[in-house]
Image (spheres, rainbow, N blue to C red):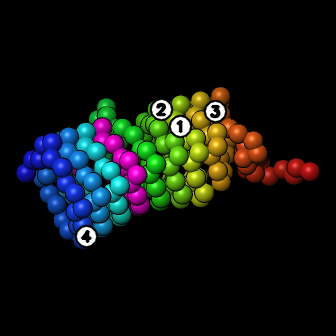
Amino acid sequence: MEYESQKFEKLNIEGKRFENLTFSECEFYRCEFFENVLERCAFKNCIFHKCVIVNNAFSHTLAAGNRFTGCTVIGLNWDKITQPHVLFLPFEKFEDCVLKYNVFYHLKLKRLDLHGCDLQGSFFEECDLTEADFRDCNLAETVFTGANLTRADFRGAKDYVISPQDNRVRRAKFSFPEVMSLLRCLEIEIE
């Protein structure tokens, strides 16, 4: 079934299974999606505004160019809804979102705008985050492993622990005193 340019408001869907659905340029407003399974679905250029999306599972699902504003997205594994041969990201922008316990694995996220988001407990492994915007983000318990953070902007970000040994941080921007956390991984003493 295909939906185009439709607006969905205050949907509350929990524990359902969906197959072969396509949403193009649709708007989801104040919707809640909990622990659903989506197979062979597509979300193209949709807007999610003040939605809650928790622990949904995806299989052979495609997403491209979607925007999230004021949303709470918890426990989403983004590499399950992207394909290595697809040129577009599943998301275009996150604005004032809570993205707790999300997994970003081996994704090209150049210039990703996460300004002001809460990314607590999220996981970025082997991602290209060149010029990504992490300004004013909460990064408590967030893990960066093998990530390219070249020219990424962390000014005003809080509670991050980034190992310069395990990640590329060349020309990344940090603010003081939080930048001191980069030294934690070096196991040195500062007096």
Q: Which residue is mark 1?
A: 133
Q: Which residue is mark 4?
A: 14
* Closer-to-camera residue (121/116): 116
**Which residue ends up furthest to the right in the rendered image?**
191
Q: Which residue is mark 3?
A: 172
* Closer-to-camera residue (138/61): 138
Position of 20 with respect to 61 (left or right) is left
Mark positioned earlier in the residue sequence (2 or 1): 2
Quadrant of the image occupied by residue 43 = top left
**Which residue ends up furthest to the left in the rendered image?**
1
- Whole-angstrom CA distance, mark 3 to mark 2, is 12 Å
- Whole-angstrom CA distance, mark 4 to mark 1, is 33 Å
Look at label 3 and name its amino acid: Ala
- Whole-angstrom CA distance, mark 2 to mark 1, is 7 Å
What's the magenta region? 61-80
Q: Which residue is mark 2?
A: 111
| Whether residue 113 is situated above or below residue 183 in the rendered picture | above
* Closer-to-camera residue (163/69): 69
Quadrant of the image occupied by residue 38 = bottom left
Crowding around mark 2 (Cα neighbors within 10 Å: few <14, some 14 to 19, many 20+) is some
Seen at 40% across and 58% down, the residue is: 72
